Image (tube, rainbow, N blue to C red):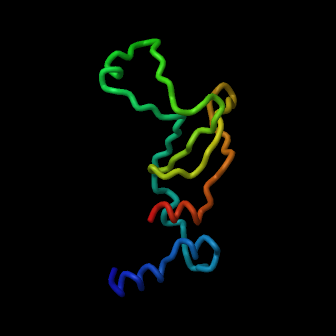
Amino acid sequence: MTTSDNAARAAFDPLTAETGLASDLNLDVILDVPVTLSLEVGRARIPIRNLLQLNQGSVVELERGAGEPLDLYVNGTLIAQGEVVVVNDRFGVRLTDVVSPAERIKRLR
């Protein structure tokens, strides 16, 4: 990393911005940027042979137990965990644990 890179990083440090120390930071420029939100119920590793045998009614066992929280990702970065809820006959997610802003930024680096 060059000296100019260090200077640029020092000029805009999101950790400082989130603590309120950088009062000139204007987040309005990014508020309309679309992001991908995904929920992960669990994961499974299976051989292609077993994958090709799946059909309607097949059950794939996940590594998580029933009742464990879902993981909420934004653009592939874990930001929270939650549980499934039903609101007005639609599924939703109630966030039960949110990763701190400082920790989210550390994971991006």
* 81 displayed left or right of 47: right
> Which residue is located at x 47 percent, y 22 percent?
60
Give the tally of numbered discs: 0
> Which residue is located at x 41 percent, y 32 percent?
45
Q: In this view, does 58 lie above or below 6?
A: above
Q: Where is residue 23 in the image (x, y as percent from the top left)?
A: 61, 79
Q: Within the image, what quadrant is residue 2 found in?
A: bottom left
Viewport quadrant of the N terminus:
bottom left
The foreground one among 27 and 52 is 52
Q: Is residue 58 above or below residue 74?
A: above
> Which residue is located at x 66 percent, y 45 percent?
95
Q: Position of residue 48 (x, y in %)?
A: 30, 25
Q: Position of residue 63 (x, y in %)?
A: 52, 32
Viewport quadrant of the C terminus:
bottom left
Q: Where is residue 28 in the image (x, y as percent from the top left)?
A: 54, 66
The foreground one among 26 and 103 is 103
> Which residue is located at x 42 percent, y 85 percent?
7
